[in-house]
Each structure stands twice: as C-alpha cells, then as structure tokens.
Amino acid sequence: QVQLVESGGGLVQAGGSLRLSCAASGRSFSTYDMGWFRQAPGKEREFVAGISVSGRSTRYADSVKGRFTVSMDTAKTTVYLQMISLKPEDTAVYYCAARIPIYSDYENQIRYPYWGQGTLVTVST
C-alpha cells in the first residue's frame, strides 16, 4: 500500500503559476499509474491529469491542456503538477491518486484505490 501526501497549494493571482507535489511514503510509484483530480466548492471531483507508471504517457482534461503539466521524478517517489496561466476557475482542492496500471482510462476515479488528503489552490482575480 502507498500513502500519498500532496503539497504546494496556496493563494495565487490569476495568470500566476504553482507547482503541486505528491510524495509517496511506504513505497515508490514504480508500480502505479498516477492521477491528479480536483474538487471545486459545490462541485463534483473531476479528473485533471494522469501519468503512466513508466512516465512516458500522460493525459489531460481539456480544461487544463496547454497550461498544466504532470511529471514524475526519476526515483518515482514524487509526482508533480506544474500549473501555469492559472484562472479563478482552477480554484479547488487538488488530490493525487494511485492505481495499478491495468486500465487505459485515467479519468475513472473508481480505478484509484489510493488517495492523498488534498491541497487547496485558490486563484484570485
């Protein structure tokens, strides 16, 4: 089992940047696909980005394509979500999640048994 801890959230002005981190404890990500999800106030949690266990394949929600980049360190112990050109509508609690790499659809939250506690990102106008 892997424990996930997100960090890097905070308050940023529209147009600014943040980098979120998701660190693994207990074991590395070397046997998991990783996903980033977010939940805005009053809304359901939604898919943001995913990265394969190899790190070679990524997928993004249409709303963040070209602005967000998901990556993994070479030791496969930390996954990052680099966010640029942030918009007020990006305000949400951001969660990282891990799943075994047997599925193709990163978007399906049910596939992810392991979740972090979330980190809040607030984008002001």
Image (cartoon, rainbow, N blue to C red):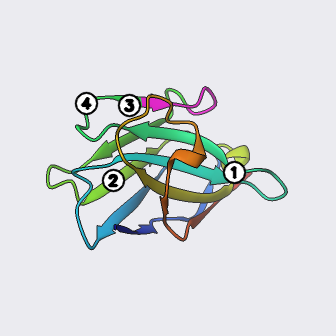
Q: What's the distance in space between the residues labelled 4 and 1, CA to CA?
A: 25 Å
What residue did someone put label 3 on? 58
Real-space Cα distance between discs 3 and 1?
19 Å
Name the residue beneath numbered marker 2: 79
In front here: 96 or 99? 99
Instruction: Say if residue 28 shows up in the picture.
Output: yes
Which amino acid type corresponds to the residue marked 1 in the rendered image? Arg
Image x and y of residue 10, in percent: 56, 66
- Locate the N terminus and report the quarter of the image it occupies: bottom left
Residue 56 is one of the magenta-drawn residues: no
Inter-mark Cα distance, 3 to 2 = 12 Å
Mark 4 falls on what kind of element? loop
> Quick check: can you spot residue 16?
no
Q: Where does label 1 land, which residue? A: 45
Using the image as rendered, state which of residue 121 and residue 50 is in the foreground.
Answer: 50
| Secondary structure found at label 2 | strand
Amino acid on which the number 4 mark rests in the picture: Arg
Going from N to C along the chain, the mark reached first, 2 or 4, is: 4
Magenta stretch: give its range: 59-64
Of callouts 4 and 1, the N-terminal one: 1
* Residue that appears at 58% across and 39% down: 108
Rendered location of residue 33, percent (x, y) = 36, 44
Q: On the rendered structure, is 5 left or right of 94? A: left
Q: Which mark is residue 56?
A: 4
Q: CA distance from mark 4 to mark 3?
A: 7 Å
Q: Residues within 10 Å of mark 2 (few under 14, many from 20)?
A: many
Disc assigned to residue 73: none
User: Which amino acid lies under the numbered mark 2 shown in the image of this protein?
Assistant: Val
